[in-house]
Structure formats: structure tokens, C-alpha cells
Amino acid sequence: MSASLPVVRSALRTFAIYGVYIGASILFVIPFVWALSGSLKNPYQLELFPPEWIPDPVLWRNYAEIWTIVPLGRFMWNTLFIAVLSLAGQLFTASMVAYGFAKFRFPGRDVLFLLMLSTLMLPIHVSLIPRFVLFYKLQWVDTFLPLIVPNYFGGSAFAIFLLRQFFRNLPKEMDDAARIDGAGYWRIFFQILLPLSRSALIALTILGFLADWEDFLQPLIYLQSTEKLTVSIGLRFLAVTASSDISGDPTTHLLMAASIVSSLPPILLYVVAQRQLVQGLVLTGSKG
Amino acid sequence: MSHRTMHDTPTRESLAARISRPFRLGVLGWYEARWGLFFITPWILGFLLFQFGPMLASVYFSFTDYNVLRPARWIGLDNYQYMVTTDPRFWKAIQVTVYYVVLRVPPTIVGALICAIILNQSIRGRVVYRTLFFIPSITPGVAAILVWTWVLNPHYGLLNYMLDQVGIEGPSWLGDPDWAVPSLVMLGVWGSIGGTSAIIFLSALQDIPESLVDAARVDGATWLREQLHITIPLLTPAIFFVLVLTIIGTFQAFTAAFVSTNGGPAYATYFLVLHLYERAFQSFQMGYASALAWVLVAFLLVFTYLQIQGSNRWVHYGGD
């Protein structure tokens, strides 16, 4: 008895851990299963009580219909377009600024760096309205420019912070050697720092894409024409305009199908790239 | 050769010491400084154009009557006075926002902590579980809200169906003024506890020295006591950090209410940022909305300050 007790206890423990794991996973996943089930029904099936988990018949054509009732493909393309152009500017200028903060000495550097970090804490709302006024006067409202151009000025403070950490952890002998060889700062930047920082840049690309796909408030205030909306705003547009069809029947099945389709790109990206994401973030040394 | 001298100063000097040290530059120093400033120029311009400049303008707007089309008209403190004395929605918005923060923050922190502790157990397939836990937090906000609106549908939704199975008649959730905020809390907690906060806790957990945990086990501590007396105290700096960020983020709640209830029913989910959005971009009262933005900042500052003040009572830093 006394000999088998630890074995029993460890078996129980394993059992309990698995139970908690599976229970938690179900809580996280079940809304998606419910949405998937709903996305394959018709209005009549949606209102059955008790509900059926597996619809009969299964209406795959709902997934064909969502591309025609709103330009969902267009919304996704717009978001991708904005994300790619934003990230190009953000990664390039954030790397430049991080290089300046990491490898040079100049008066006021540390004060400026602290100032930059403190902007992380400020809510966007204090600059939102004047920025809107500025872009309105520039006649940039209902274009992608207000969502793209600010990224060409250092990108986000978070990206600068992360890259600076990364650059500082690179052995300085490397750029010393390059300088002895007569390499200028630009060459060190392009030929040594950027290639060595691939993992951090990839991590920032993933995070940036996820953030742009999710972004709501800014696209909401700047974009107006239907064909210019991003995924998030487009989904809301769909929810508002198509909450019921002409005959007054609910269109929940279409909303669910559109929600699932527009969740897939970020989820797939995360699943495919999570190793690079973790690696990039850990290598920056931000953990310690 | 002389370039090497540039790097002679120790890089690990404390920030405060470096700021207070007078700066002396030789010819080469000036050359380096110019290049350094050149490389950070994009940020300096961006800061002035898109952050500091707009902030100054926002302070100014908050003392004016401004609708974009006509020039701003200085009205002194009228916006602030109207806000606290006359605006029928302001106090409601404050009340709703604070209620949401109070209801939302504790389960978010506790939930993220539990997720991190579970994910820290050595078990097969951990990466799969980590992914499953993380997925809600990267699901686009609007998609998650639409899915939850369907889960919470009073007549045909999953939650009320499950409650019905155990003999409870569920409320109409987002449609019920008493349940609308708790519904948004549920949605928000689901969408955030497996995300970045859990990751921060997880990396803090992995920094706990094995020797401490082993010592406790040798002393015969149960799993629960081990968590309460060793793990949690060592995590308090991380908990504090996540708490501050979560409160700041929760005060700015907008998207969920805007998409699911648009502030209703009966203004039950009318958050401060929703009020700001309506005033700025639907009524074009840019001056008044700017004043609301500064009230939001004031709230954040006060709450963050109070937390920093209170933190030395419960946050244990490793050094002392």
C-alpha cells in the first residue's frame, strides 16, 4: 500500500492535469465549433430548439455566398495591402531608429529613448482627433494613407525598443571590425545588422500583421467607401447591413461563415510561424 | 583605429547615471553624434508630427468649440464644465466604464495566471495546447464578437441552451441591461486570458529557480501550498506589470460594445471611448471630444499612480 501510494498519486496528478488541459481547451474552442455549426445552416435550421450540432443538410454554399453579398475578398486584399506597406515602412525606419539608439552616443540620447518608451503608455485618443483633422485637411480621409504613412516615421515604439535590445546584444567587435575595414554606418546597417536581425524582424512582421488585421478604431474613422474597408470594418458592415435578409430572416449563418473565413489568415499565420515568433522575441533578450 | 575609443564607455551603466553625466564631445564624437541623430530622425519627425504636435493641438481643442469646418472658437473651460454638470451621458459613461474595469480585470489576471500555470506543467503535446489557448487572442476582435453574439443569442444561443439543459432559464445577455456588461466581460476574458498576459506569466514562471521549488517539495509542501507560497509571490512583479497594462487597456474598451450593442441597451454598455467616438465622429464636436480624451488620460494616470503606490505592499522584487 505504502509503496504504491506515490504511483497512484502521480497517476491521479497526470489525470487531473490532462483533465484541466482538455477542459480549458474546450472552453477556448467551443465558440468556434458553435460558429462553424451555425455557418453551415439555413435560417430555419438556426432556429431549431434544441439546436443540432451537425446541420442536416450541411450547407457548404453559405461559404460561396459570403463573397457575393459583401466584397469580402476585397476587404481582405485591402487589409493585406495596408499591412504590407505599413510593415515595410515600420521595419525599415524602426531598424534605423533602433540602430541610432543602440550604437551611437549623442547628447540627449537616453532622454529621447525614455520619451519614446513613455509613448507606449499613452492612449491613442489624445492624438486621434488632431490627427484626423490633419488628414482631413490633407484630403486623405477615405484613402489608405492615414493608416500607412505614419508607419514610415519609426513605426511603433515597441518595434524600436525590441530592435534596440537586439542590436545591443550583438557583439560590438563585429561592427568594430567592419569599421576598421572602412565600412560606413550605412554599410554596417545594411550588411551586418539587418541580416543578423532576421529573426527579430520576422517576429515583428508577424506581430505587425496580426495587429493590422485586428485594427478597428483607425480604419473605422478613416475609411468610408465600401470597397475600401478592411476586414474588421467590413465584417461590422456586414453585421449591420445584413443582420436580416429581405424577407426578414436572420443571416447569422452568413455572419458566422464570414467570421470564420476572416479569422483564418491570422490563425494560420500564427500556427505556421509560432516558432519564429517565439525565437525572435526570446533572442532579443527582452525576457531577461 | 581611433574609432575604437567610441565604445570605451561601459554600456551597462545605469540610465540615471548616464543622463546626469555631462556630455563632452571631441571631433570624432561629433561625427558619431551627427550620425546617431540622423538615424533616429524618422522617429523624431514622427513624434513631433503624429504624437507631440497632435497632443498639443488636442489640449488646445479641448478649450474650444470646433467642428472641423469652421475655425476653432476659444470657450475656456466650458467643455469641462458642461461635461461634469450638464452632459447627460458623461457620468453614465464613467460609471459603465469603471464597472466594466472592476468586473473585467480580476478574472482576466487570475485566468491568465491559471493558463500560465497549466501550460508550465511538463506534459506531452504542450505546444498544441499553447496554440489552442492562444487562438482566441489572435482571432480578429470583430469576428470574435459576432461569434459570441451568436453564442449568447437569448433564444437559439449555445449558452442558454446549455443552461436550459440544467434547468436554468438564461437571461437575454447582451439584450438585458443588467447582463450586457457581464456578457462583454465574458467575451473579453475568453479573448484575452490565453494571450500575451499568459505568455508574460509563463516566461516569469520559467525564470523561477528549480532549487526553490525542490526545497519546498522536500519540506513536503502540497501543490497548492507550493503555488500560494512560492510561485505566486515570485510572480508578483509580473502580475503588477500585467495588471497595470490590463487596466490601461480595459479603460479604453470600445470595439466590443460598438459592434455588439452600440452602447445599449439603455446605455448599459456606453463606455467612455464610445462617448468620445460619438461626439467626435458622429456629432463632430471635436473640442468636446478632445476634453473627453484628456479625462480618459486623467483616469489612467490616477489609477496607475494608485497602483504604483499600493504596489510596495504586495509586489516582491527579487533583489531585497
Image (tube, coloured by chain):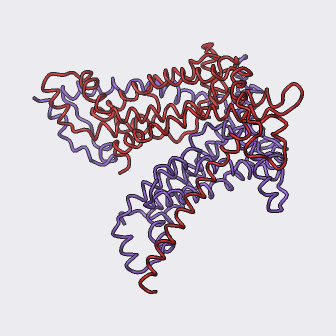
Chain letter tied to purple? B
Residue beneath the point at 70% across and 51% down: B100
- Where is residue B103 drawn, in percent x and y? 69, 55
- What residue appears at the point 67 percent right and 25 percent down from the top-left corner? A221
User: Which of A60 and B119 lies nearest the eye of the viewer?
Assistant: A60
The residue positioned 46% from the left and 53% from the top of the image is B125
- Horizontal side of A253 relative to B56 (left or right) equals right
> Residue B140: horizontal and vertical position, in percent?
61, 36
The C terminus of chain B sits in image quarter: bottom left
The single residue placed furthest to the top in the displayed view is: A139
Q: Residue at x 27, y 28 (%)?
A: B33
Chain A, chosen colour in render: red
Quadrant holding the N terminus of chain B: top left
On the rendered structure, is B142 left or right of B90? left
Residue B59 visible in the picture: no
Would residue B15 be found to the left or right of residue B265 on screen?
left
Tell me the quarter of the picture where residue A189 sits. top left
Q: Nearer the viewer, residue B117 or A158?
A: B117
Image: B52 above or below B254 = above
The mark tally for this picture is 0
Instruction: Evaluate whether residue A95 shows in this view.
Output: yes
